[in-house]
Image: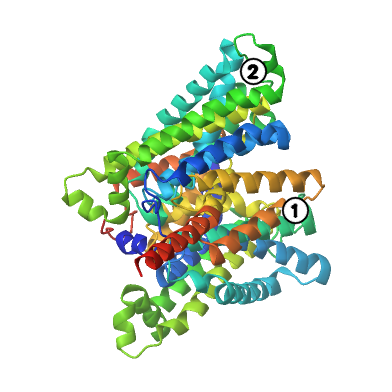
């Protein structure tokens, strides 16, 4: 039983990375209609930048947790202004391909600069060791990562549902024409939303840094699982992205624990089942096809 | 939603040719193309020439879906790599002549394409790309786990090139090229036949207006699955020849980067042009060969940049741009002769 709780916690911690990134992916898709292939690369950049901050500038985890998302926000703004913007009027496939090309560039650039072996990153002081609850030993950092992701997801959820900014963003997602007619400058929100989505991926990268091997390739598999996550949750749905993120994290953790050979495959079987039974995803709206 | 999306594609997909069926220029171009295929191994290293043809057919199989049916498959590595392994296994264990093994590989690709296609066509547009990508990755993991069969990270080595005991073909890449080229040309001919058939016309109807195609009584999903399976078979044919040519099948062939690379080749050649795939393959394969032989390591930087640039500035691709120039020229001349 104690093992099971440990696996659950590991799953929830990993699920937190998926949930945060999927949330970013969903917000970007909602407002811009863009599926950002480079989301995995942005997650990787988040982790690499925190490792570089620690290794070369001796800037610790807590500062990185604030600084890296801001840097990634800037990166996202640049990316939207310089590249993504020009293809917004066209079929979303073009931006999918554009961000795919960008992924190749980012991964290769990091590989050339920092090599293929992992960058070192230690669990920050204060979060090392384990917490014992009864007979169960749980890693302090995993608990922190899990709680932190939940808090951020809830905060973003509240931002989107309870504030005026959130209302504008949701309105621009659902009915851009009508929102314009009400005198709201929809175009103004496109760039910040894109940057915000990228910042979430970067944040997930910072959180993952102490527990994962930080390499140029760390986002490659991540993005594909992220796609499975949003297909399971329903790409248009914010709630779906978060729930499916934690769900996939759990499935993956149980898979690694009980059937290591099939751990990765189970996620895709789950996705196949969802596509078969409910093509629009668990929380997605029906597609007009 | 998807209907609006496909309507926004600014590339003039798969339009009927400006040249009439009897126009001599068509035959001249066809003959010139065949001449290039025949002369290629004289100009460049024969295995590289073989790679160009394999990637060309692979890109054509993707174009069949992307340009003629409006479906972006981002998981075609599954069929290319799946067939590479299957061809290798058949050739190694049964010792049959390699074209038979390649055929076996292509059939295997079509068999796995059916369930994948069945599930994937339930989603359209960008979702289709994501779902196919995920399924291809699933196959990658399976191949990685089934070490006894696939050799895991070492790959499948020493695939024999049996060809009815004709030693020249079996050992010399120069002569092997011509046998491989025949297989690839058969594949291209099949793709051309599919596009220029009543079935192909229905596909374009499905691409341009699925709701209307459905209203006219066509089972849209079934057409999509059928073309998906055909496309997988062609990708499998290409992958099989590729594996026999290199006498090696590796996990690289199943990786998502391979799926991405073939889409790059297709877009560079020109979406919806069919022949563009061969041109795109010629450019990408020779470029990669040149970069690798000159010791340049960051190939991803170059391919990534090409991707970004063509998507931003050169969406018609090489063949598409050429066709547009020709069309403008012909139309102007017709206009002038009328005046």
Report which quarter residue B170 is drawn in.
top right
The chain that hosts pointer 2 is: B
Picture layout, residue B292 above or below residue B171? below
Q: Secondary structure at mark 1?
A: loop
Label 1, residues with CA under 10 Å away: few <14, some 14-19, many ≥20: some
Q: Is A112 left or right of A80, judged from the image as shown?
A: right
Q: Which sits earlier in the primary sequence, circle 2 or circle 1?
A: 2
Q: How is the image coloured?
A: rainbow
> Residue pushed farthest bottom?
A183
CA distance separating discs 2 and 1: 33 Å
Q: Is B168 left or right of B226, judged from the image as shown?
A: right
Residue positioned 33% across, 39% down in the render? B225
Q: Mark 2 or mark 1, which is nearer to you?
A: 2
Residue A217 placed where, x, y %? 67, 51
Instruction: Look at the numbered discs 2 and 1 and tell me whether their residues touch, using CB distance below 8 Å.
Output: no
Q: Is A288 left or right of B130, judged from the image as shown?
A: left
Quadrant position of the C terminus of chain B in the picture: bottom left
Per the image, the residue denoted by label 1 is B298
Report which quarter residue B173 is drawn in.
top right
Residue B151 placed where, x, y %? 64, 25
Quadrant position of the N terminus of chain B in the picture: bottom left
Q: Are marks 2 and 1 on the same chain?
A: yes
Q: Nearer the viewer, residue A274 or B72?
A: B72
Label 2, residues with CA under 10 Å away: few <14, some 14-19, many ≥20: many
Residue positioned 56% across, 40% down in the render? B32
Residue A139 placed where, x, y %? 63, 54
Residue B52 placed where, x, y %? 62, 39
Report if residue B236 is visible in the image: yes
Per the image, the residue denoted by label 2 is B161
């Amino acid at each position: 039983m104690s093992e099971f709780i440990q696996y659950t916690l590991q799953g929830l911690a990993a699920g937190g990375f998926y949930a945060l990134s999927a949330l970013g992916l969903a917000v970007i898709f909602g407002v811009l209609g863009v599926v950002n292939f480079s989301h995995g690369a942005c997650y990787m950049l988040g982790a690499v930048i925190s490792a570089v901050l620690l290794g070369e500038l001796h800037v610790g985890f807590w500062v990185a947790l604030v600084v890296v998302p801001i840097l990634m926000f800037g990166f996202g703004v640049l990316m939207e202004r310089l590249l993504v913007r020009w293809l917004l009027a066209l079929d979303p496939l073009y931006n999918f391909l554009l961000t795919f090309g960008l992924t190749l560039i980012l991964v290769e650039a990091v590989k050339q600069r920092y090599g293929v072996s992992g960058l070192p990153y230690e669990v920050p002081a204060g979060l090392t060791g384990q917490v014992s609850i009864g007979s169960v030993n749980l890693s302090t950092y995993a608990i922190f990562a899990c709680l932190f992701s939940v808090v951020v997801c809830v905060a973003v959820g509240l931002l989107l549902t309870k504030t005026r900014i959130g209302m504008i963003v949701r309105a621009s997602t659902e009915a851009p024409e009508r929102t314009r007619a009400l005198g709201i400058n929809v175009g103004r929100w496109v760039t910040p939303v894109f940057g915000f989505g990228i910042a979430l991926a970067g944040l997930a990268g910072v959180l993952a840094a102490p527990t994962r091997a930080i390499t140029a390739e760390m986002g490659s598999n991540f993005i594909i699982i992220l796609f499975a996550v949003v297909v399971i949750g329903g790409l248009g749905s914010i709630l779906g992205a978060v729930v499916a993120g934690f769900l996939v994290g759990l499935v993956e953790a149980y898979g690694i624990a009980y059937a290591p050979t099939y751990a990765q495959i189970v996620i895709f079987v789950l996705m196949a089942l969802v596509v078969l039974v409910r093509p629009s995803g668990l929380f997605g709206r029906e597609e007009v096809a | 939603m998807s209907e609006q999306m496909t309507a926004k594609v600014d590339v003039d997909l798969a339009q009927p040719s400006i040249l009439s069926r009897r126009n001599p220029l068509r035959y001249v171009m066809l003959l010139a193309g065949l001449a290039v295929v025949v002369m290629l191994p004289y100009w460049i290293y024969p295995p590289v020439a073989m790679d160009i043809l394999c990637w060309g057919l692979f890109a054509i199989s993707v174009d069949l879906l992307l340009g003629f049916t409006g479906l972006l498959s981002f998981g075609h590595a599954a069929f290319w790599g799946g067939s590479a392994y299957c061809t290798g296994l058949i050739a190694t264990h049964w010792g049959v002549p390699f074209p038979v093994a390649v055929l076996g590989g292509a059939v295997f690709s079509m068999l796995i394409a059916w369930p994948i296609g069945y599930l994937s066509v339930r989603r359209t547009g960008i979702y289709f790309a994501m779902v196919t990508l995920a399924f291809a990755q699933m196959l990658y993991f399976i191949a990685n786990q089934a070490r006894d069969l696939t050799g895991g990270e070492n790959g499948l080595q020493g695939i024999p090139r049996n060809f009815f005991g004709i030693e020249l073909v079996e050992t010399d890449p120069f002569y092997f090229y011509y046998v491989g080229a025949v297989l690839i040309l058969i594949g291209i001919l099949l793709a051309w036949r599919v596009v220029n058939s009543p079935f192909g016309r229905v596909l374009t109807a499905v691409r341009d207006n699925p709701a209307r195609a459905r209203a006219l009584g066509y089972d849209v999903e079934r057409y999509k699955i059928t073309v998906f399976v055909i496309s997988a078979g062609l990708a499998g044919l290409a992958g099989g020849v590729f594996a026999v040519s290199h006498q090696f099948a590796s996990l690289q062939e199943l990786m998502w980067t391979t799926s991405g690379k073939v889409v790059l080749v297709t877009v560079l050649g020109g979406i919806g042009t069919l022949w563009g795939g061969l041109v795109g393959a010629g450019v990408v394969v020779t470029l990669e060969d040149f970069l690798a032989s000159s010791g340049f390591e960051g190939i991803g930087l170059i391919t990534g940049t090409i991707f970004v640039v063509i998507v931003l500035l050169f969406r018609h691709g090489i063949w598409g741009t050429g066709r547009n120039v020709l069309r403008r020229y012909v139309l102007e001349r017709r206009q002038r002769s009328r005046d």
